[in-house]
Amino acid sequence: MIIVIDAGNSRIKWGVHDGSRWLDAGALATGEVARLAETAAKWPLEARVAVCNVAGAVVAETISSICAERRARVSFLHASAAACGVRSAYDSPGQLGADRWAALIGARAVCGNACLVVCAGTATTVDQLDADGVFRGGLILPGFDLMRAALARNTAQLPFADGSFRELPRNTMDAIVSGCLQAQLGAVERMFHGLAAEPGALCLLTGGAAPRLTEHLNIPFQLMDNLILDGLLRFAVSAGT
């Protein structure tokens, strides 16, 4: 039995895999990491556990303690020069976020062509993976909700907007929502240009805000349930966690 845990800035997602299929999955707020113990109590003892953590040392320590109570064999994924068919061209491979690395590994498992890997959550990451499995580089920008929150927090008269996407917005709410979405879409589509000429090039999107983007993208794309958990599973299998 393999358990994978993705500890992100806003949410902790987890899944249980029996080697053939997902048996269970769930999520909770990162600030409530201690509640993971309630879920872990249902996991089998001495399971293999693979963790991706970008939420800091306290979260990592809490997850480790919870897993220790289940006598689990735990491995934390860290970015490296190469893993699971993916090679990194990052200047310092170890500085790449573990979540981005896991998503790239997950993408390589489902796509043998060049692809753009987009994780749309608290932050949005946009990473190029070529047909040879080389991570060329990528972007980090504030996510859709973070952009809206920044405008509301740092301007005197702009609210946390809940408008609609319009090509030519004619009210403030729609202008904010459309501006934030256009910024996300523009970053994704501009990065895809670097891969567009390659055969079968595709954009893979995952994360809570991904469905908002797919409504308006003008490039070939596929919405994935959770590339990070998929990458963690592949890592756990390859490493024999």
Image: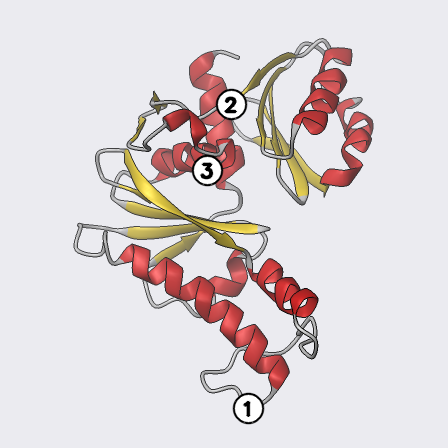
Q: Which residue is mark 3?
A: 100
Question: What's the amino acid at mark 3?
Answer: Arg
What is the crowding at mark 1: few (fewer than 14 residues within 10 Å), some, or many (at least 20)? Answer: few
**Residue 71 versus residue 124 in the image, above or below:** above
Q: Secondary structure at mark 3?
A: helix
Measured in 3D between alpha carbons, the distance from the residue under mark 2 to the one under mark 1, in whole angstroms, is 46 Å
Query: Left or right: where does residue 15 sit relative to residue 241?
Result: right
Residue identified by numbered label 1 = 170
Residue for badge 2: 77
In front: 41, or 33? 33
Residue in view at x 69 percent, y 79 percent = 157
Q: Position of residue 172 (x, y in %)?
A: 61, 84
Residue located 48% across and 63% down the image: 213
Please, what secondary structure does the residue beneath circle 2 have? loop
Looking at the rendered structure, the kind of residue marked 2 is Leu
Q: Earlier in the sequence, mark 3 or mark 1?
A: 3
Proximity of marks 3 and 2: CB atoms separated by less than 8 Å: no
Q: Is residue 202 above or below residue 93?
A: below
CA separation, marks 3 and 1? 37 Å
Q: Name the residue: 54% across, 30% down.
A: 21
